Image (tube, rainbow, N blue to C red):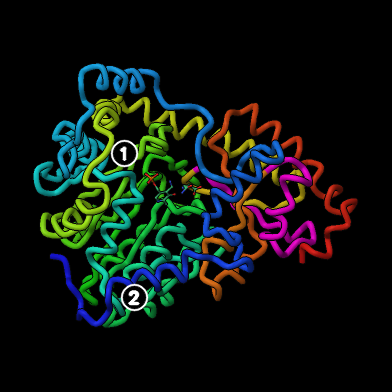
Amino acid sequence: MVDEGSGAMQPWQRTAMGANLLSFDGSSPTGSLGVTIFEEMTSLATATGAINLGQGFPDEDGPEVIKDAARLAISNGANQYAPGKGFFNLRSAISRHQQRFYGLIPDPETEIIVTTGATEAIAASILALVSPGDEVITFEPFYDSYGAMIALAGGKHVTVQLKAPEFQPDLDELTEAFSDRTKVVLLNNPHNPTGAVFGANILERLVQLAHQYDAVIISDEVYEHLVFGAETVVPAHVPIATVPGAAERTLTISSAGKTFSLTGWKVGWLMGPADLVAAVRTVKQFMSYSSGPPFQNAIAQALELPDSYYTSVAATLKGKRDLLITGLKAAGLAPYTPAGTYFVNADATPLGVTDATALARALPELIGVAAIPVGVFCTPEGAKNYQSLLRFAFCKREEVITQAVDRLAGLGSAISTSGLLGSLK
Ligand code: PMP
Ligand code: GLN
């Protein structure tokens, strides 16, 4: 259940700790306004007319039939508060989805709650489980909300580096990251921003260590259906909750945003053992309470789409991934092929650029394409290991990627004629 902590820290102190992280100063890659890097780069792309391969959102909506279902739900009166834990039809559709794809059967009454996107599920889980001073382990780089939420909870963020080219962690370093203070290990698989899909050996070691140190696993699996079956890693998504011994201590989080290309609907969910889910629900009810009744109804239907829908999402994205990778190579960058997600990381070092943050800021003006520097997904210490990497999103129409690739082809010469090279090192 919710741990109240020692009571040593007042709520305002907790907020102040989070605010340190959230109110970035001008020297931070995210600028002085405290906006996320995604917002900053999207604004820059809009202002310069650049193709936005920065913020990860598709430029085509999900299935028409699901949009129709939301319209119908509005007409039929699904317009007042949904229950705090979400509509039963959605919770049972989530349970059936877990059974169909992974053989898991969470109880829709006690083991699943609907959240306002995966973001709220992540926030409520961390606030429910982490007390000031507790340690939370994530891989690095990490999705930006993890660092902010750990700070807001007063937790200590411990990171384990992912190493190119496959961005898998070293098992010894993973083991060393655990301590008696470890409360939560926050996994993201498939992984944003690197596109890594973690091997069975990593998942098994994580479960074994979580047992040894009595830690809860929070597993963010929003990209569960965006897996390409790369040759060198596991071919399809394996939820960590299916690893023997994991289910009893794992909260699994996902959302409709990526799978159904409906990121703005913010329909997410969380599942796990009843006591942990109840603890998260306690916090969640004071965040949004509940949200999006018509969207919940529509996503309940979306989850029942046939297997062919899910496989076509991955297959279409795989073609776009390969198109972008070919273009990034032609531009003189060194891309790493992702096994999942809709992001590819590319090293700018072959172009003589080692400061990808400076390059990301210059890129929209320089060649009309926006990307995100991977260093912003890092702690200040960790950032140096990723400072020459840029993340490009390929969840865009093929013609848009083709146009971006055409523009990127001029990158090397644009850098040298601009005279900027000195400031990009
Ligand atoms: N986790 C990861 C790893 C993500 O990339 C995102 C991006 N959208 C989220 C969580 C947030 O998901 P949602 O939009 O459902 O809140
Ligand atoms: N998940 C998206 C990304 O990584 C962004 C979501 C957001 O803007 N907060 O690009």
Is the shortest distance between ligand 1 and the CB of mark 1 under 8 Å? Answer: yes
Q: Nearer the viewer, residue 294 or 335?
A: 294
The part of the image, by quadrant, that contains residue 407 is top right
Q: Over which residues does the magenta segment extend?
A: 342-369
Q: Is residue 321 above or below residue 74?
A: below
Residue at point 16%, 31% (across, down): 89
Q: Which residue is mark 2?
A: 13
209 left or right, relative to 321:
left
The part of the image, by quadrant, that contains residue 303 is top left
For the C terminus, the quadrant is bottom right
Q: Which residue is mark 1?
A: 267
Secondary element type, mark 1: strand
Q: Is residue 118 visible to the viewer in this orientation of the structure?
A: yes
- Residue furthest front as drawn: 12
Q: Is residue 300 visible to the viewer in this orientation of the structure?
A: no
Say whether disc 2 or disc 1 marks the residue closer to the N-terminus: 2
Residue at point 48%, 66% (across, down): 140
Does residue 364 show up magenta in the picture? yes
Q: Is residue 156 above or below residue 94?
A: below
Q: Amino acid at mark 1?
A: Val
Report the Cα–Cα distance between label 2 and label 1. 31 Å
Q: Amino acid at mark 2?
A: Gln
Q: Nearer the viewer, residue 291 or 316?
A: 291
Does residue 357 show up magenta in the picture? yes
Label 1 crowding class (10 Å Cα cut-off): few <14, some 14-19, many 20+?
many
